[in-house]
Amino acid sequence: MPRNVFAKSLRDQRRSLLWWTIGLLAVVAVYIAPYQQYLDQGALNINTDAGFYQALGYDNSPAGYLQGSLFALTGALLAIMAAVVAGARAIAGDEEAGTLDLLLAHPVSRTRLVLERFAALAAAVGWLGLVIWAATVAAVNLADMGIGADRIAVTTLGLVLLALGFGTAALAVGAVIGRRGLVLGVAAALAVAAYLANAVASQVPSLGAIRKLSPFYYYLGGDPLRTGLDLGHLAVLAAIPLVLLGVALWSLNRRDIAT
Amino acid sequence: MAETVILAEGLSKRYGSHPALHRLDLAVAPGEVFGFLGPNGAGKTTAIRLLLDLLRPTAGTVRVLGEDPRAGGARLRQHIGYLPGDLRLEGRQTGRELLTFLGNLRGGVSRRRIDGLAERLDLDLGRSIGGLSKGNKQKVGLVQAFMGDPELLVLDEPSGGLDPLLQQEFRAMAREARVQGRTVFMSSHVLAEVEHVADRVAILRAGELVATEAIEVLRQRAPRRVEIRFAAPVPAAAFEWLTGVREVQVDGDLLRCLVEGGADALVKAAAQFPVVSLISHEPDLEEIFLAYYTAEGGGRRAA
């Protein structure tokens, strides 16, 4: 049996983590592994001048395809959804279900609860990152796409931090308002707004500054599949969940717990 | 050990303009079983959740085992066992899994201790909590509150959902806790639940304290139902105006009435007539409760 809130949270997530893992493996298997077949069939001969493709960073090159199909689209969507659902559950889910009451009546401080729930969230998202990385490296080798495992690792690390940021946003909003439905709505709205801010601004030169407000810019804006590590960008991505964790600690510590 | 286990002074909690608890003063001594009575919505749960730092007071102070609940934090809660009034348990785990986990949060509770309590309450630990009845969930709640042998037990409506036999078992557990020097603070909206176990009770109504009394004092003040059967019909007028006698009903040779304080006036008046039998019922705390309500001029109010 779990000895603490961290272990218990991970244990409670094991079923949903299994499904997210299967989903991510399926996405990599369907999109990336058959790259050469898609190329041979001419399925990738798309006019990529359209802003939509450029916003995804998509072109017919292996790196462009990997980014456009997986890292900027399906993989990012699944990882962020998984993180947001887990983050919403971390505080708001328990509070709305009424189970937070009994837990916090135990010798568990609110600070410890938030930290351990955050750690469980980070571990879950980290696991999904590991799945994406391993599956992608295998698929890229299978499809002979010639992209190094290190660059995939750097890009996946960016995705993990990005997803953790949105997951922590859900956790923090939950620490402020404690209503799961509202938390999911706010977190989804944040993710869509951040995505659009980056995508639109990347196509409109006059909006370049706005782009830098979106975490998506720090995730793929530096083109990590081609250029590799950008510590500055990763640092920004790492700072976001930490700041939001601070918000969560501050707000849960000062308010009433709902029944 | 602190001189008072629970000490509230002017403790208040408002939600917007609604005062859930208004200037509560309370002192609970070590080793006491303290009943906290009031109808649903009177503020009992609010007061209890303030003790556990689940809520923060809007005014006043409270000390639990000598400490402010917020300052005492997790270290203080190590010494408190709590049963929520609205107990919610995550369903996808067995009773044993949940209890072991909650025990671990307290630094570990032995399997034997958990098994012993479960056996006493006739609780099957191997079943998934999601499939348990309300009464069985309540048993899980009682086990987790008692299993750490805390100095203070704070139990919100502990016998809710338990059948009479188990209510009796619970009362035995509460008495044993007192014998071991622990303090039990338990709320109820049914007076009979605390009558046989509590030393003192506080009565709460619409967020305000109506009275704090030793259970014996309450009993003495308690209105008793008295029935006297005479050898021949008696006139109601002979009893209607006696001091301390209310609700006089005469049905031929049978007199029914409610007696408060002493029964002296009634007995002397009855002595004028040939008495066949006299029955005095044990005081019902429900009536005491109502007596306090009307005495305080509020009438019944469901908040």
Image (spheres, coloured by chain):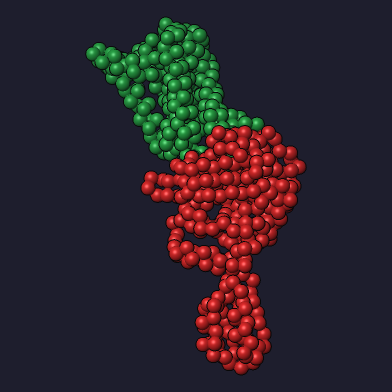
Chain colours: A green, B red
For the point 35% across and 22% down, the residue is A195
On screen, residue B170 above or below A140: below
Residue situated furthest top in the rendering: A227
User: Picture quarter containing residue A190?
Assistant: top left
In the foreground, B8 or A154: B8
In the foreground, B34 or B127: B34
Residue B203 seen in the figure: yes
Q: Locate residue B98 relative to residue B46 in the image: left or right.
A: right
For the point 29% across and 17% down, the residue is A210
In the foreground, A218 or B23: B23
Q: Locate residue A230 relative to residue B128 in the image: left or right.
A: left
Number of marks: 0
In the foreground, A207 or A172: A172
On screen, residue B229 above or below A209: below
Provide residue B202's location: percent of width, then percent of height. 56, 56
Q: Locate residue A238 relative to residue B64 in the image: left or right.
A: left
For the point 53% across and 39% down, the residue is B53
Provide residue B294's location: percent of width, then percent of height. 47, 66
On screen, residue B68 above or below A44: below
Indicate the quadrant containing the N terminus of chain A: top left, top right, bottom left or bottom right. Answer: top right
Provide residue A58's location: percent of width, then percent of height. 35, 15
For the point 38% across and 30% down, the residue is A188
Residue situated furthest bottom in the rendering: B232
